[in-house]
Image (tube, rainbow, N blue to C red):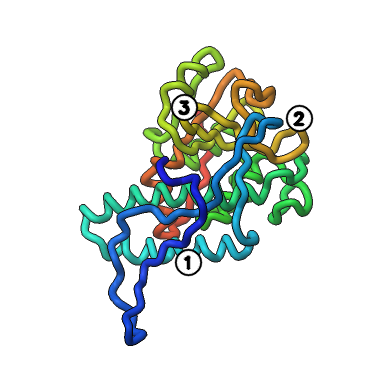
Amino acid sequence: MKKLLIAFSPFILFISCDNGQEQKTEIISEAPVIGEKPEIDSNNCGLNFIPSKNYKEKKNQIKTLRNKFATQYKSSSDSNKTNLMKVAQSTFTSALLNEIIPHWYGTEWDFNGYTAKPNEGKIACGYFVSTTLRDMGLNLNRYDLAKKGPKDEAKSIAISPENLISFSEDESEHLLDSINNGLYFIGLDNHVGYLYKHNSITYFIHSNYLENKVMIELTKTSEAFMSLTYYLANISENDLLIEKWLTKESIKIVTDKN
């Protein structure tokens, strides 16, 4: 999770020669820095991310960046693909956390809300997740994903069982202490959102039905985070998910048979 939360500076893949001709693409070895430095919000006990640019501009910037990653990923050797995947994971996490999600903070919650525009209309918890993932450039049907239960949403985002963990309320403290820093999808009994772990502290990012708005808060003090069962799908270190982001392959929305 290094370099995810520092001031915005676009990463340039192409360098112009003195004669105005484009040089060949450089190997991406470091994640482009996306987003503003978060500030501690003492009232919320969480993090206050300040996005740069407007929502449409930011989506277009992420799309351009994704396309450049995808072009290089397609033509890279297997060894370079491994390195590029790590950078792409870091970039995806940074962009989603610092540039897409923050535009939604304060958007009003409603059980039937499905707005596609932050702070215009209302948004339910499932649609908050599916819309922000769609706006990051993942090829998914936000309506189909949002209509699924927490377990199915987690399985759809995890793609493979190796990226999914289920645990009980009694196990939650130990489990959250043991996972790596990063961004995750989290499904509860009747609620969903993102779980973000930073410097060993966990935060819940969600459309909060108790506070009636999209917000970020500490998991340990969040009443909405209470659940008998949890489903945790890795996002930051999910090779399969990020590969689908790069290749634009459709995300399959699954239905649990059990």
Q: Of helix, strand and loop, which one carries label 3?
A: loop
| Amino acid tagged 3 | Ser
Q: Is residue 80 above or below residue 208?
A: below
| Amino acid tagged 2 | Leu
Instruction: Left or right? Give the position of 210 relative to 254.
Output: right
Q: Of helix, strand and loop, which one carries label 2?
A: loop
Q: Residue at x 77, y 36 (%)?
A: 212
User: Which of pointers 3 and 1 lies earlier in the amino acid sequence?
Assistant: 1
Label 2 to label 1: alpha-carbon separation:
37 Å
Label 2 to label 3: alpha-carbon separation:
26 Å
User: Which of pointers 2 and 1 lies earlier in the amino acid sequence?
Assistant: 1
Q: Residue at x 37, y 33 (%)?
A: 162
Residue 198 position, x and y percent, is: 48, 33
Q: Residue at x 60, y 18 (%)?
A: 228
| Amino acid tagged 1 | Thr
- Of all residues shown, which one is farthest toward the bottom? 19
Neighbor class of circle 2 (other Cα within 10 Å; few <14, some 14-19, many 20+) is: few
- The label shown at residue 200 is 3
Q: Is residue 139 visible?
A: no
Residue 200 position, x and y percent, is: 46, 27
User: Which of pointers 2 and 3 lies earlier in the amino acid sequence?
Assistant: 3
Q: Mark 1 highlights which residue? A: 64
Q: Mark 2 highlights which residue? A: 210
Instruction: Left or right? Give the position of 129 relative to 245.
Output: right
Neighbor class of circle 1 (other Cα within 10 Å; few <14, some 14-19, many 20+) is: few
Q: Is residue 116 visible?
A: yes
